[in-house]
Amino acid sequence: MRIVHVESGRHLYGGARQVGYLIAGLDRRGVENVLVCPPQHALAEDRPRVERHEVPMHGDFDLGMVQRLRRAFTELEPDVVHVHSRRGADLFAGLACRSMGRAALLTRRVDNPEPRAYARFKYRPYRLVVAISRAVRDELCGPGGIDPARVPTVASAVDTAAFRPDLSARERVLRAFGLGDDAFIIGICAQLIARKGHELFLRCLPEIVRSRRNVRVLCFGRGPLRTRLQRLAAELDLAPHVQFPGFRDDIAALLPGLDLLVHPARREGLGVAVLEAMAAEVPVVATAVGGIVDAVTDGHEGLLVPWGDAARLAGAVARMIDDAAARKRMGAAGRIRAERDFSIARMTERYLQLYRDVC
């Protein structure tokens, strides 16, 4: 079987990383994979051995993408085209496949609403539209949406071999960021964009550090809000407590050194950072939104709070700081859940069955 994967995002964020996991899993099962992506895509560098076909992709208004993708699919002759991203690829790859009679499926990773008429038009060429969580599926299949029979659910995966407990990681984090031995280290691993909720957490942080001066927060990731968030941290007198290290390609080696992951997102398809923390036995405090509730059971792998409730968020974080036994118990439960429900092998098997179905 020959699968062409279309990924238009340029950076190795959560969605692109999932494509890499799937290609690796399929390769182990003897499936032939080709990555269709823009030039100099970070995923191509991350998976240098995968065959790739570079196609310029310039976003939602790049009408020429249809013809460029048609040429690529004609040359590559796939059994199935699997489209993984938005930015025009979801619309234009579907149109290209429909005009050629190619079997195609699309994975949708976000739960934000779309105009119903446009969504029905955009998804019509795909035999299946795969949701990564119940929240994404509910959005796709809501009133006036897609036929639920066309919307299977396949959860994202985490590489539990790369993201795993590591007792040496704490010392690594302390050295890398100049932290004291007594630091309580909180991480946020997310793009610096509004829907990830950094501002909400920063605004409740002064209450937390008032009586817990050893708390240190590392905001991993990049994005357009970096300067604004740094300014807010300074205004709230949080400079001694908060760092913005940016995107780190060694996050798997650093994550097990955290004491807690906070994920205060307003919307989330599933939350790859949450899965990675669970795999590393790091307990989680997150908002009960989107697909996060598919990954975290409140009180088991972590604590969930309603979005926008700063008092509840602060209280949950404070509770985790003060209760080492709960952190240990929830961290261990998270590792078990990640290995059982979110493995690369499990995700690969589900997609293999879907490929057979659409063929």
Image (cartoon, rainbow, N blue to C red):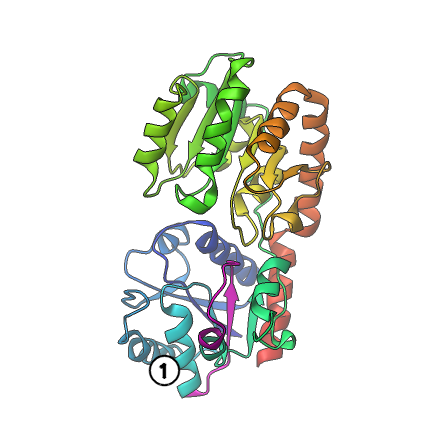
Point out the stretch of residues depicted in magenta.
100-119
* Vertical order, 235 against 309 (above or below): above
For residue 144, what is the image quadrant? bottom right
Residue 332 in the image, given as x and y percentages of width and height: 70, 33
Q: Position of residue 240 (x, y in %)?
A: 40, 16
Residue 262 quadrant: top right
**Horizontal placement of 302 versus 75: left or right?**
right
Vertical side of 264 occupied by 184: above or below = above
Residue 322 vs residue 187: left or right? right
Residue found 71% across the figure and 43% down from its top = 297
Find residue 73 and report its horizontal and vertical position in percent. 38, 78
Q: Nearer the viewer, residue 142 or 42?
A: 142
Q: To which residue does mark 1 refer?
A: 74
Residue 14 image point, x, y percent = 47, 50
Q: Evaluate whether residue 259 shows in this view.
A: yes
Residue 218 lies in magenta, yes or no?
A: no
What kind of residue is marked 1?
Thr
Secondary structure under the numbered disc 1 in the rendered image: helix
250 or 190, which is in the foreground? 190
Residue at 32 percent of width and 43 percent of height: 224
Image vertical order of residue 355 relative to residue 107, above or below: below
Tell me the residue at 45%/77% (across/down). 78
Image quarter hosting the C terminus: bottom right
The number of numbered discs placed on residues in the rendered structure image is 1
Can the viewer see residue 280?
Answer: no
